[in-house]
Structure formats: C-alpha cells, structure tokens
Amino acid sequence: MTVSSAIHSGNIVDAEIIERLYSIAGKPARNYQSPIHRWFRFPAGFAADFIDGILEQFANEIDEKPILDPFGGTATSLICARKLGFNSVGIEAHPLFYRIGKTKLQWDVDLTDLSLAVEEFVADISQGVDSAPGFETYPDLVKKCFSIETLKQFDAAVELLNLMKKNSDGIVTDFLWLGLVAIVRKVSHCCTSPWQYVLPNKKRVNHPNAITALRKQYSQMLGDLLFLQKQCIPPASSILVYGDARTPSFLDKESVSLAISSPPYLNNYDYSDATRLESYVLRDASSWAEITQNFRSKLIVSATTQVKRTGFDPEAMSQEIPRRIRADLLGTVNRLTDARKHKGGKKNYDIVVCHYFSDMSKVLREMARILEPGKLFIMMVGDSAPYGIYVPTDEWLTELALDYGFSDCQLIKLRSRNNRWDNRKHNVPLRESLVLLRR
C-alpha cells in the first residue's frame, strides 16, 4: 500500500464520527454567537464547537502536560481547552492576532474596576476629539474608509491607549484596545468585509457611530466575562506565546500531550493584508513596506506577497525538504514555473509552494520533538491548485510527518472546496481535511 492510500485508510479514529461532528459544528461562523470567541471575527480558523468535539473525542489521551496549538491565531483552541479543564499553550507570530488572543484569555479580572475603566475611556475619547490633530496623518486608505469625526475618535483612542500602556494595568489596557480593534470595520462608511477585503469606493448606507459601537462592544465583552466568571470551569492554564512555530525553543522535548491546529492554507491568502486596515488605524504600520516588515516577514509563507523572485533556486531550497516528497514537489514547482510564463499576472506560485513546504517541514520536525511518544497532532488543512495545478497539501504534510518519526496517520475529508463560485479560476476539485498524526 502506498503512503497516499494508507493515509486515507488509517484507523486512529472512526472517520464517520469526525465527519458527523464537522457537519454539525464545523462552521467558524458559529463562533460569532459564542462568548469570548465573538470578540473578534476571525473566520480563517477553527470553529470552536468543532474543537470542543475533537478534544472531547480524544480526552482520554490528554494528561497533565498541556495541549499545544502551534498556530494559535486568536486563541480559539486555547479557550476551548481551558473551558474543558485542559492546560494549553499556543504560539502565534502575527502581532495583532497574538494580542487579540492573549486578551481573550484574560478572564480573571475585577469587572467593577473594568466597567469604570470603560466609562472613563469612552468619555475621554469624546472629550479628546477636538485636540486630536493626528488624524490627518492617517494613510489614505484609512481616510477613504472613515468620516473625519471617526478618524478623530480613533486618533484620540489610540493616544489614550498609548498613555495607558505606560501607566496602567496591562489587562485593562488590552481589554480597551481589543474593543477598539473589534469595531474598526463596523463603523466604516465603506464596504469592509469582516475579513481582509476593503472597498473604499463602495459605500454603505447604515453604519454606527464609533462611540455607540464602542459602548455596545464593551457591554458585550463585559457580559461575556460575567457569564464565564459564574460558570464552574475546571482550573486550567492557557498561555499564548508570541513566537514562531518553526522554532519553538521554549518547549522541551516530549512536553506536550496533544497538539491541534489549523495551519495557514496554501491558497495565496495574505494574513498581513487581512489586518492592514486595523494595523493602520492602530498606527502599528502606515505603509505596505511597514506591513511587510512588522507582520508579513514573521509568518509562514503562504502568499505571493511574501516572496521575491530574485535568487530563487528550487533545487537548493528543496534540499531542506525530506526526500519523501522532494521529487513530487520539484515536479510541481517546475510546472508552476512554466505555467507562470503564460499568465498575465505572473504570480510567483512556484516560489510560494517551495517556501510553504520548507516552512511546514520545520514545524513538523519540531512537533515530532515536542509531542510525547504515542500522542496525536491533529491538523485541519486544505489543498490547493494554483494556476490549476494540483498540490495535495494534506497528503504531502502527512508524508513529511512520517519522515520525521510519526508512526501512524489518517486523513479524513471534511468537505469539498472550489465548488461554490461561478468566477473560480479553475475546476480542480479541492478538499478540506483533518489530518491525524500519531507520534
């Protein structure tokens, strides 16, 4: 039996159980109605209900050592683990996602003091609008998306947060900061979807005032914390670390009892550009170059905006990748290089594919080091077909894992992809899969 056929017929878990769970609880949109998870819309990750089901399914394999999410995002998996009483640790390299996730894990706070801080903060924003000349220095994209009044309110809020960062309780400052982040797209008069796309020339008729939106957001967040504090949640620790899943040196050998994650998909999705509007408003960046320096350069390569053609040598780069997939990878990269010559956009998909598997190879090698023997690494991943050339991401990642010492594997198809849009660029059938790897 070949590796590719073996991974589709593994017996780590009954596939029907996982398929049924996903059909019921697999949509990330369900997070938008769930306490804490709904504080920031992050549709590129796990559905919390699905993680709950997975953790409950494998609860008997989890010991006192923590659960790990190497791509922690906004801490969805860590929140789920904590609610179920499991210790957990996550790693996140995107600075904005890291701070959002860290804030969502701070439940043990005095709600009376926090409510007073909210009222004072909102009042100070209103009073500081007239003395907020910095709004004029916002990038043009921001100026196109918000009224002058809203820009002044943003500017006043950011100035206040910067002062609080120096002089106040970090938990309170993080809470107020996240409330501001959460309303950025809600108060724009332009069409700004909850994720990535910003259309400055397309206007919305109805949008709330920033102060009104802030009050509503903080009210919801305070209510969620009150709800959690009233629950009988088992004691457990959840820590999100700002770091790189390729080099998690802070984690010791065999220090994790289960790992669960949804790594970046190889689908040319720029996670840095996805938060460009928020980053500009918060003054964490003011240009494309600063987005690259402050965000894009820190992440696993999965988009053409992260790579340059200069000096690209696929043969040399592939030497970092185990032989198990090297020939297939190089063949696909060469096909993409040829296809690029005949495309108007000349996207560097060949470079992205090579970098992606080089990066993920390092992650899998580290996962083999960190996991206890016999324990599981569970990944939700999607395959891709840039320029219509199929890349079996889930299968190749599984084969890499086997090369690094994982002893058993199973791949379960969760859903079909690339079958919803009339304007799709190719007709190659794609899938989203759950990959289970036993150390």
Image (cartoon, rainbow, N blue to C red):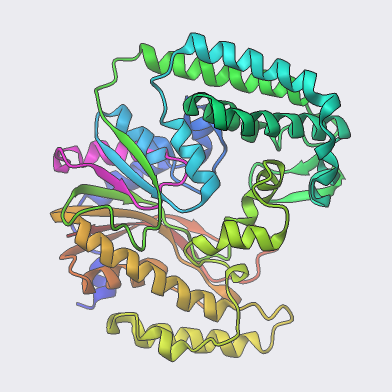
Residue 98 at x, y percent in the picture: 48, 44
Q: Residue at x 52, y 48 (%)?
A: 95
The answer, for residue 251, to whether it is visible in the render is: yes
Residue 422 at x, y percent in the picture: 69, 61
Residue 77 at x, y percent in the picture: 37, 40
Q: Residue at x 28, y 81 (%)?
A: 324
Q: Please determine whether, in this image, residue 9 is positioned above or below residue 115.
A: below
Residue 195 at x, y percent in the picture: 63, 46
Q: Nearer the viewer, residue 190 or 370?
A: 370
Q: Is residue 228 magenta?
A: no
Residue 7 in the figure: left or right of residue 211: left
Q: Is residue 74 magenta?
A: yes
Would you identify the image quadrant in which residue 42 lies? top right
In the rendered image, which quarter contains the N terminus?
bottom left
Q: Residue at x 41, y 23 (%)?
A: 107
Residue 60 in the figure: left or right of residue 223: left
Q: Give the residues drawn in magenta, as a range.
A: 50-75
Would you identify the image quadrant in which residue 268 lies? bottom right
Q: Please determine whether, in this image, residue 345 is positioned above or below residue 240.
A: below
Question: Which residue in the rendered view is the most extreme toward the front?
Answer: 167
Question: Which residue in the rendered view is the most extreme toward the left?
Answer: 373
The answer, for residue 24, to whether it is visible in the render is: no
Question: Which residue in the rendered view is the most extreme toward the top?
Answer: 112
Q: Please determine whether, in this image, residue 240 is positioned above or below residue 394.
A: above
In the rendered image, which quarter contains the C terminus?
bottom left
Residue 244 in the figure: left or right of residue 159: left
Count the labels in the image: 0
Q: Residue at x 47, y 24 (%)?
A: 35
Residue 250 in the figure: left or right of residue 417: left
